[in-house]
Image (cartoon, helix red, strand yellow):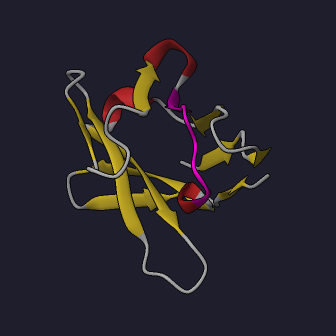
Amino acid sequence: VQLQASGGGLVQPGGSLRLSCAVSGSIRTFNDMSWFRQAPGKEREWVARIYGGGTTGYADSVKGRFTISRANAKNTVYLQMNNLAPEDTAVYSCNAVRGTISLWGQGTQVTVSS
C-alpha cells in the first residue's frame, strides 16, 4: 500500500488549498488517517485526524480553518485549508494507521507568502 500526497503549492496569505492523499489500497482498512506537517528547522507536528467512523480532530493552530475529510470510494483523504497564513508553510504528509502498522506518504510543499 502506498500513499501519495498532492495539491501543495504557493498561495497568498488568506488563500486556500486542498491537499489530497491517495491510497493505493482501500482506505476502509485504515481506521486512523492523519495529516502532519513539518516546517523548516522544526519538528513534525500533527495537523488533523479522521477516524473510520468519521470522527475528526484538529490541532489548535488549524482549528476552524482546516477541514479533513475522506472519500472511501476514491480511497482518498483530503485536507481543505482556508485562511492560510505564513506560519502554515511546511511540507504536509499523510499517515495511515491500521493496528500496529503506520504508513507514510511523501510530502507536498505548501508555501504561504505574498
| Residue 61 point in image, percent of width and height | 34, 52
* Coordinates of residue 107 in the picture (x, y in percent): 64, 59
The structure residue drawn at horizontal position 76% and vertical position 43%, both measured from the top left corner, is 11
Please state the horizontal and vertical placement of residue 111, each as a whole percent of the image.
Answer: 72, 56
- Specify whether 6 is left or right of 54: right
Q: Residue at x 47, y 17 (%)?
A: 71
Residue visible at 34% across and 44% down in the picture: 48
Find the magenta span and give its range.
Answer: 76-86
Residue at the farthest top position: 73
Say if residue 97 shows up in the picture: yes
Instruction: Tell me where residue 55 appears, x and y as whole percent.
Output: 19, 26
Would you place residue 42 above or below residue 71 in this image? Answer: below
Q: Quadrant of residue 70?
A: top left
In this rendering, the answer to whether 104 lies above or below 94 is below
> Going by the image, does 113 lie left or right of 42?
right
What is the count of numbered marks? 0
What residue appears at the point 50 percent right and 61 percent down from the top-left corner?
A: 37
| Image height of 22 relative to 53, above or below | below
Query: Residue 46, located in which quarter of the rendered image?
Result: bottom left
Which one is in front, 96 or 44? 44
**Is residue 97 inside the magenta stretch?**
no
Location of residue 66 with respect to 53 vertically, above or below: below
Question: Is residue 82 one of those drawn in magenta?
Answer: yes
Residue at the bottom extreme of this rendering: 41
The answer to whether residue 91 shows anywhere in this view is no
